[in-house]
Image: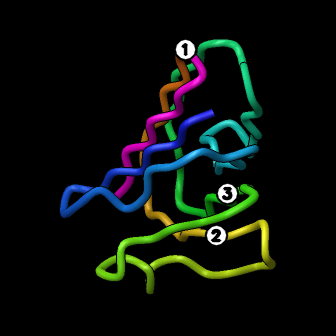
Amino acid sequence: MILEIVSPESKLFQGEVTSVSLPGVAGSFQVLNHHAPIVSTLKEGVIKIGATSFKFDKEVAEKFTKVNEQLYSLKIASGTIEMKDNKVIVLVD
């Protein structure tokens, strides 16, 4: 699936991923390939991104923390997510 993470300042990430774990207001949840459509709000926490490879723009790379070769994390204050047609769009603060 395609993941796009956007902040008010810039696009933080766009690429093919295998999973995304998110801090939902009603509890953490995970989105996998071909997940049903969903719209949700996010609270302060950590987004975990699973993928076979990562490519970050050098301007935003320092915002991400490497957990291992196939997992990176990103701290957020709040946000929203939309999953539709195997594309996840996350708007974060």
Which one is in front, 41 or 59?
59
Q: What amino acid is labelled 3 in the image?
A: Ile
Of the two numbered discs 3 and 2 on the same chain, state the one appearing first in sequence.
3
Q: SS at mark 3?
A: strand
The relative height of residue 25 versus residue 86 in the rendered view (above or below) is: below
Tell me the distance, in whole angstroms, between the alpha carbons under discs 3 and 1. 19 Å
Q: Amino acid at mark 2?
A: Ser
According to the picture, the residue beneath numbered tag 3 turns out to be 49
Q: Which mark is residue 73?
A: 2
Residue at the image point whose x is 68% and y is 81% from the top: 66
Which residue is most to the bottom? 62
Among numbered discs 1 and 2, the one appearing first in the sequence: 2
In what quadrant of the picture does the C terminus appear? bottom left
How crowded is the residue under tag 1: few (<14 C-alpha within 10 Å), some, or many (20+)? few
Q: Which residue does the numbered mark 1 point to in the structure image?
A: 85
Range covered by the magenta-colored residues? 85-93
Q: Secondary structure at mark 2?
A: strand
At 63% from the left edge and 33% from the top edge, which residue is drawn?
Answer: 1
Nearer the observer, 18 or 40 = 18
Instruction: Kindly check if marks 1 and 2 are in contact, taking CB atoms under 8 A apart as contact.
Output: no
Judged left or right of residue 69, residue 9 is: left
> In the image, what residue occupies the spot 73% across and 42% down?
27
**CA gap, disc 3 and disc 2:** 6 Å
Q: Position of residue 87 (x, y in %)?
A: 53, 27
Residue 80 found in image quarter: top left
Give yes or no for contact between labels 3 and 2 (Cβ–Cβ under 8 Å): yes
Up-down relation of residue 68 to residue 41 (above or below): below
Give residue 89's position: percent from left, percent from top: 44, 36
| Colouring scheme applied when the structure was drawn | rainbow
